[in-house]
Image (tube, grey):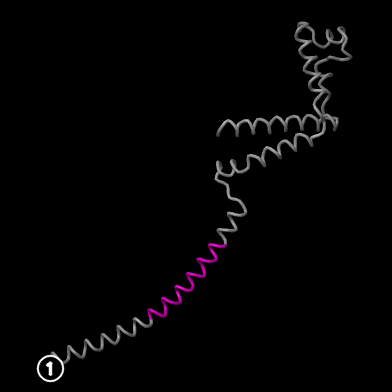
Amino acid sequence: MGPVELLAILILAGAIVVLIYYYLMESGNIAPVTRIYGAGEGTAEGREGYMAGVGEKMSDVSDRIMGKVREVPISTDVISNKIDAFLNEKSDELIEDWSLATMDDISKLEKRLELVSRNIDELEQRFNEYRGHTNKKLESLDRRLRRLEEKEEKD
């Protein structure tokens, strides 16, 4: 697997994680991240209550991360469109790399199979005609050979 495919898989996995997170947020099955980390209303007392023992730098980093998470759009249309565009752009490479068959490939194979089946039927019919003709010739040759052998025995 090349780096492009690995990057595509990582992007898809990240998108799925974000989608699951937002789904859980919307359905009320998960508390918002601000409550989990205890950023609360952003006051120092709120942070101290929930993040006892964590340095001030760490809480600043978590605040910055939370700010970035809040900036992520809830709509999945943008992500879906980007994934679709990526797959459309790379579909030929994916088909070739993974040896996939397209509908065109399958249609061509079906047409070839139909043509071969017809050709086999025609060949079988011609073979049967040839076999009948050949058998008649062999019988004729066999009769002539017997006559010649009989003549030789008489002489």
Q: Which residue is drawn at 58% across and 54% down?
A: 105
Above or below, comparing residue 57 to residue 30 in the picture: above
Q: Which residue lies furthest to the bottom in this view?
A: 154
Which percent across, then down, holds residue 56?
A: 78, 6
Q: Which residue is drawn at 46% across and 77% down?
A: 125
Above or below, comparing residue 138 to residue 60 in the picture: below
Q: What element carries label 1?
A: helix
Asked whether 49 falls inside the magenta stretch, the response is no
Q: In which quarter of the image is the C terminus?
A: bottom left
Q: In which quarter of the image is the N terminus?
A: top right
* Majority secondary structure of magenta residues: helix
Q: Which residue is drawn at 80% across and 30% down?
A: 22
Above or below, comparing residue 96 to residue 25 in the picture: below
What residue is disc 1 on?
154
Give left or right: position of 149 versus 95: left
Q: In which quarter of the image is residue 55?
A: top right
Q: Nearer the viewer, residue 55 or 15?
A: 15
- At label 1, the amino acid type is Lys
**Residue range corresponding to the magenta coloring:** 111-131
Which percent across, then down, holds residue 58?
A: 75, 9
Give left or right: position of 144 versus 83: left
Q: Which of 14 and 21 is in front in this view?
A: 14
